[in-house]
Image: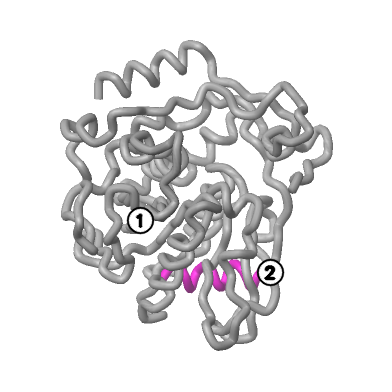
Amino acid sequence: MELPSRAKGDILLPPGEMTAIRQRLRALAARYDIATVIACAFDHRTRILPFIYADLRMAPAGVRAIGSALVDSGLTKTRIVLQQWNRNFQPTQMRLDGRLPDIFLVSSMHLHSAECDRLIQEVCRINPDQRPLIIAGGPRIIYAPWEVFSSDPEHAWGADVAVTGEEYVLLSLLEVLLSTRAGSEPLRSTFARARDSGALDGIPGLVYSRSSTSNGPVEELVDTGIQRLLGDLDELPHAVLGYQLLEPPGRNAALALHPLPAGRVRKHCLVSSVVLTVGCKFRCAYCPIPAYNQRQHRVKSGERVADEIEQIASA
């Protein structure tokens, strides 16, 4: 399936906007004590060549990028849970600083759909008054966001919102929510007010559900359109920040008190990925990458790439 593109001249974010939104979020996040858990869905039944070994020896770039963006935006109480390392993880038992997180994010490939759905369904079993806001993203969601919203009246479950774009879309969503949050109300309640008032419709790259009851089956989905892309990848936060947020490998269903110490990351993560470019100059008929990137080929500067490699190597 080939994704559509925005109109020419409206594809890229204004220069400096990715940096600016993180500055604005830092000011907003300072008012609240937001805890966030990011889960990387992984179904161990699907391990296949040629990825065996590497699949368990590297922290995927996607969840690290999201974690880095959150931390650099002031949401420092963030934990990344890799099901590759924590196959017994149960969202109903997750606690950060002794409490359920305010936001639960899950990233998934199509290959890991079963685990992604199970994680979301488990969060939906948490008492509605305490339940975190559920945000789904990743390659699966980019192409099939409807899959994480159930319309079955006998088994109502689903994410609150799906992000079909990159980090800027998520940060834009959080900016709206933190700007409109009333005191210490649950962030899920803030989301419901923003959704119902139309405040989310101006954020391209979201899909969210509407139903006649707060916990009922999905009756319709709202797609806010195609995201605007970050043109200068040097504006991204340093991905090395994500390595400071990893849940230690283990067999427990609950989270550890602290993330994996920096000195132990190298023991478990023997391979590190570094994003150099995004998109492609070519137009192969079978490949979805050019369409997702709206025919843009985006790069990091040589200086930025060298700096990231040095930071990762010395961490």
Check residue 13 in the rendering and tell me which mark sits there, or answer none. none
Q: Is residue 292 shown left or right of residue 25? A: right
Residue placed at 20% from the left, 65% from the top? 98
Residue 151, position as x, y percentages in the image = 62, 78
Of residue 129 and residue 256, the one placed in the foreground of this image is 256
Q: Amino acid at mark 2?
A: Leu
Q: Amino acid at mark 1?
A: Val
Residue placed at 52% from the left, 28% from the top? 235
Residue placed at 37% from the left, 64% from the top? 102
Of residue 280 and residue 47, the one placed in the foreground of this image is 47
Q: In the rendered view, tell whether residue 255 sits above or below residue 93.
A: above
Q: For residue 201: magenta?
A: no
Residues shaded magenta: 185-197
Of residue 301 and residue 10, the one placed in the foreground of this image is 301
List the residue tagged with mark 1. 37
List the residue tagged with mark 2. 221
Q: In the rendered view, tell whether residue 168 sits above or below residue 253.
A: above
Residue 51, position as x, y percentages in the image = 43, 36
Q: In the rendered view, tell whether residue 283 sits above or below residue 56.
A: above
Element class at badge 1:
strand
